[in-house]
Amino acid sequence: MRLPRSVESADVKDKAVLVRSDLNVPLEDGRVADHTRIRASLPTIRLLLDRGAREVRVCSHLGRPKTDEDRANYTMAPVRAAVAEAVADDRVSVLENTRFHPGETKNDPGFARELADGCDLYVNDAFGSAHRAHSSTVGVAELLPAYAGLLLLDELRNLGRLLGDVERPFVLISGGAKVEDKIGVLESLGGRADAVLIGGKMAEDVRVENPFSFDAVLPTDVVAASTFAADAETQVTPFDERPDGWLGLDIGPETSADFSRRATGARTVFWNGPMGVFEWPAFAEGTFAVARALAECDGFTVVGGGDSVRAVHEAGVADRISWISTGGGASLELLEGKELPGVAVIPS
Ligand code: 3PG
Ligand code: MG
C-alpha cells in the first residue's frame, strides 16, 4: 500500500500548522464520554510542539449537526477542554466544529481557504474521517503542503497488513445488525481468509441467502429470547429449534466455544461486529468470549468498528489486541480495497 509522507519529514519549526484530527467522540451530559480518539491524536500534536511549531491549530468535526439546536449540542467546548487538560501549551488551539460550516461536507473551496488561512502546513491525522472528501480532509490539503500524522500512518500500516500476505490461519469474524454494511469488506477479505465466522443478526440473513462467494461458518446454537428486552425469558437452543416467535440475541455456548477456539488458534484475525445484543448482560457472553479469544491469540489481531471496539474495552482485554482501529467506516472502506480520499490527496 502506498503510504503518504509523514509529518516526521516536515520542517515545522516556527510554522503555523493546521492539524485535522478525528475528535468525533461520544458525549454524555456535555462531557467527553470516551477519550480514546483524543488520546490517539496527542502524539502528533506533541511531535509538532516538540519540533518547535509556532502554532498548532487543531480542527475536527463532531457529530452530524443539522439544525440550529444541534449547534449547542455539538460544540467543541468539551473536546477543547479535554485536549487542554492533556496538553497544556498556549500554542495549541482547537477550532469550532468544522461541520458548523455548511461548506465542510461539500468540500467547499471557500471553507478550505478559511481553514488554511494563516497556516503554513497541513497535517491530516484523522484516520476515522479519511473516507470523507470534505473541506477539512481534502480541500485544505490541496492548498497547503500536506503531510500524514502519526495515527493516520499507524492505521494504514496495521490495517494494510491484512491486505497483504498474512500469516495463516487467517480468520475473519463478523457480526452486528446489518449485512449490507459489511458485504464489501467481507467480500474483499473473505475470499482470502481460511475461515469466516459470522454471528449476530447478520448470521440470520446469511443463512437465508448467502451473499458471498465463499462459505461462511454460521452459529449452530443461540441464546433465544422470548421478546426483544434485556430481561426477556431466555433459553439456549440449536439454531433451527427456536420456539416460534423467539429471537436469537446471542450465539450459544457451543458456537461461542467453536468461534473462540478458531480465533485463538489463528495467526491473523480481523474482527468487526458483535455476536449479539451485548449491551444486555444476558446476551453478552458470546461477544465477550470472542474478545477474550482474540486476547489469547498469539498472532496479529485487529479489531475495527465502534461496537466491537467497545466490547474489547468492556471485556477488559483492549491492551492484548494487536491493533484497535479508531476508524469505523474508514477502516471498512480501506479493507474493501478502496482508496481513502483524505489519504490519496497527500503526496508520498
Ligand atoms: C466516525 O465516527 O465514523 C467518523 O468520525 C466519521 O464520522 P461521520 O460518519 O459522521 O462522517
Ligand atoms: Mg461513522
Image (cartoon, helix red, strand yellow):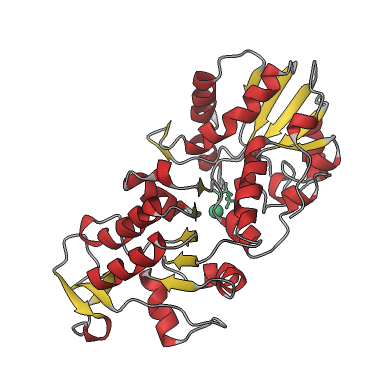
Say which quadrant the N terminus sits in: bottom right
Does residue 272 appear to the left or right of 342 in the view shown?
left
Q: Position of residue 216 (x, y in %)?
A: 46, 78
Q: Position of residue 344 (x, y in %)?
A: 78, 51
> Which of the 4 image quarters holds residue 247?
bottom left
Does residue 95 appear to the left or right of 119 in the view shown?
left
Residue projecting furthest to the top: 90
Q: Nearer the viewer, residue 122 or 194?
A: 194
Residue plotted at (45% across, 66% down): 174
Q: Note whether residue 74 is visible.
A: no
> Which of the 4 image quarters holds residue 50?
top right
The number of numbered badges drawn on the structure is 0
Q: Nearer the viewer, residue 202 or 110?
A: 202
Residue plotted at (25% across, 56% down): 280
> Which of the 4 image quarters holds residue 17?
top right
Q: Note whether residue 201 is visible.
A: yes
Residue plotted at (26% across, 77% down): 221
Image: 219 above or below 76: below
Say which quadrant the C terminus sits in: top right
Image: 283 above or below 96: below
Image: 79 above or below 335: above
Q: Position of residue 136 (x, y in %)?
A: 72, 41
Does residue 245 appear to the left or right of 194 in the view shown?
left
Q: Nearer the viewer, residue 73 or 331?
A: 331
Residue plotted at (53% across, 72% down): 180
Q: Position of residue 201 (x, y in %)?
A: 37, 72
